[in-house]
Amino acid sequence: MNPRKRLFLIVFSLLGIYTSIAQNMPQQNLDSITLKSARIDIPFKKNSRTLNIITASDIKNSAAVNVADLLQQIAGVDIRRRGTGGSQADLYIRGGGFDQTLLLIDGIKMDDAQTGHHTMNAALPIEVIERIEIIKGPAARIFGQNAFTGAINIVTKKSLNNTISTNLETGSFGQLNGSVTVGGELDNSSHIVHAGKVTSEGYRVNSDYDNSNYFLKSVFNKKKQPIEMIATFFDRKFGAENFYTTNPSFNEYEETQNSLIAFTTTLRKNNLKIQPRVYWKRNQDIFLLRRNEPDFFRNFHISDKIGAEANASYVSKIGITGFGIDMSKIYLRSNNLGNRNRFMTNVFLEHRFKLAQDRLDITRGVALTYFSDFKFHAFPGLDIGFAITDNLRAYGNIGYTYRIPTYTDLYYSDPRTNGNEDLEPEEAFAQELGIKYITRKFRASLAVFNRDAENLIDYIRQNTTEEIFTATNITEVNTKGLEVDTAYNFTINNYAQTLAFGYAYLDDNILEQNEELSRYSLNTLKHQYTTRLSTKLFKNISQNIVYKYAERTTGQTYNVWDASLVYRLKQVELTVTASNIFNADYIETGFTPMPPSNVLFGLRYHFK
């Protein structure tokens, strides 16, 4: 990466913040800012990045039963599942790796120092989700580590107003799911409690699962200084046949536990908002190569992340300044990776101001990071947007982004895989141009992007006869692509209907690298097409049809159709969800074929 180019962008960002603060500009309209998350938070319509929002209504009309299935309906997001039930899935955005996308829960970073394979372990049950915010493109200057190609923030519901909802589902492959969600509003506090169980006998040999989900969100001291607490615990036990190997003598099995507890409050005084937070995230992973022979090969890892952060924004007549600090300590205990620890500090600074009668907005920022084992890094970025009309906006952004190696990258060892203690952090310089049109009835966006990366980590073997793959920094990788996203809302007989369409094209050029020697880098989605039709023709009945087309760089193509039917009568909901209706034969990652046609019947009852 050119040091002069980086130094120029850092200086430009910092000087830009200083000089824009020194100018005399009109008062920022507070109504245009939604003060609900860390630092500068901008309404969807006025954001100068590629941003998708999945609302609670979208979730209801998605024909999806978990977050992994839901995200598959967004072009540019590649969810590679190993089976059903959300037991194990990897998250990719714009051709990045599963370690390069950051997942957040109410703004809390859920990155795992052991491996990005655990990212989706933290995904919440859809019953407690208010919306999902998907930020595509480099986001290191906003969130820090792991937001290499994008970030996904799951926003939980604020309250459920003294309700109890029960859900029971059964269907193909011996699926049996049940959950209870309770909302309570007390005089000086509010609470949301969810407990759920998701089980299946499996659709093939050794693909059974038994997953438990527990969620608690409470707000205390509502009348004075509210304090929000969020606590989660997810326990997954599942057969992992061919997840990582093809050896017929193996009978893989895995158990994971993921938990989080966090306390957040928001302090406001005039135009200043400060949001302090403390949190503890924990992940436990047990993997057996032979399910019934634990002593044959067993990996056991426990990772803890304990952190404290404070983010703030200040609104003045010359714009909005955001600043924050995030400090955390990571501990790892592992029979394979050893006992490790790492101290991290991230400092963020950004400023957003407007020109040209508020039609032109410019956001400059920089993230300064320190890792006890990878020292200091600085990552600047710049977002620019121009409101052509009230509904039409053009935008562009550039920025540096990075990812430090996981402990698996550095230290893992098995008969076919070696880590590499000499790995360098991944780095990239990314650019994006886009245009979007948004009204209540119709929205459309088009974005083109380019990413020039160096030191990307892949697992490489020296020749095709070698069986051992070693973690290696690839010299240079260029990724470019295009994304289109549209949705049309209309009515038939006064009933709301929605037709949504998305397309993503990706071209990965791995320079100076033999494709046959790489394990992970060459399975990206070259073409991805998604469409969803949500209709309601009768008062109590709604139906949803979802179509997904994928063409991977390996040459594999597949078409998948899903559908759901919902019948609502007062406090009762009856649902039928059909997945892979036309029985497509396909693999999303590794060696695990996805399930054939299947159906799930559901009954939900709402007590008030």
Image (cartoon, rainbow, N blue to C red):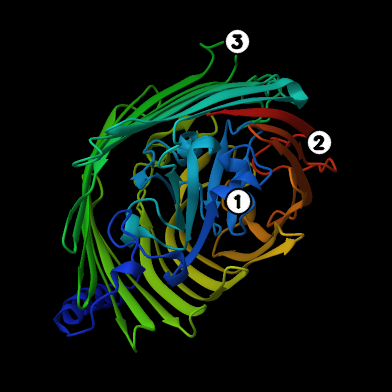
For the residue labelled by badge 3, is the local secondary structure a helix, a strand or a loop?
loop
Question: With respect to residue 17, does 509 lie above or below?
Answer: above
Which three-letter amino acid code belongs to the residue tagged 2? Answer: Ser
CA separation in Å, label 3 and label 2: 30 Å
Residue 263, image x, y percentages: 26, 36
Residue at 39%, 84% (x, y): give it.
Answer: 359
Q: What percent of the width, then of the height, locates residue 115?
A: 44, 38
Q: Position of residue 192 (x, y in %)?
A: 42, 31
Answer whether residue 477 is visible to the viewer in this image: yes
- Residue of label 3: 292
Q: Residues within 10 Å of mark 3 (few under 14, many from 20)?
A: few
Residue tagged 2 = 597
Asked which quadrant contains residue 142, the reply is bottom left
Q: For this rendering, which residue is in front, 71 or 342?
A: 71
> Which circle's residue, 3 or 2, is located before the other in the chain?
3
Choose top left, top right, bottom left or bottom right for residue 475. bottom left
Which residue is tagged 1? Answer: 58
On residue 285, the disc is none
Earlier-in-chain disc, 1 versus 3: 1
Q: Nearer the viewer, mark 2 or mark 1?
A: 1
- SS for dot 1: helix
Question: Marks 2 and 1: CB-CB under 8 Å?
Answer: no
Nearer to me, 88 or 517: 88
Quadrant where the N terminus sits is: bottom left
Q: Would you identify the image quadrant in which residue 308 lies?
A: top left
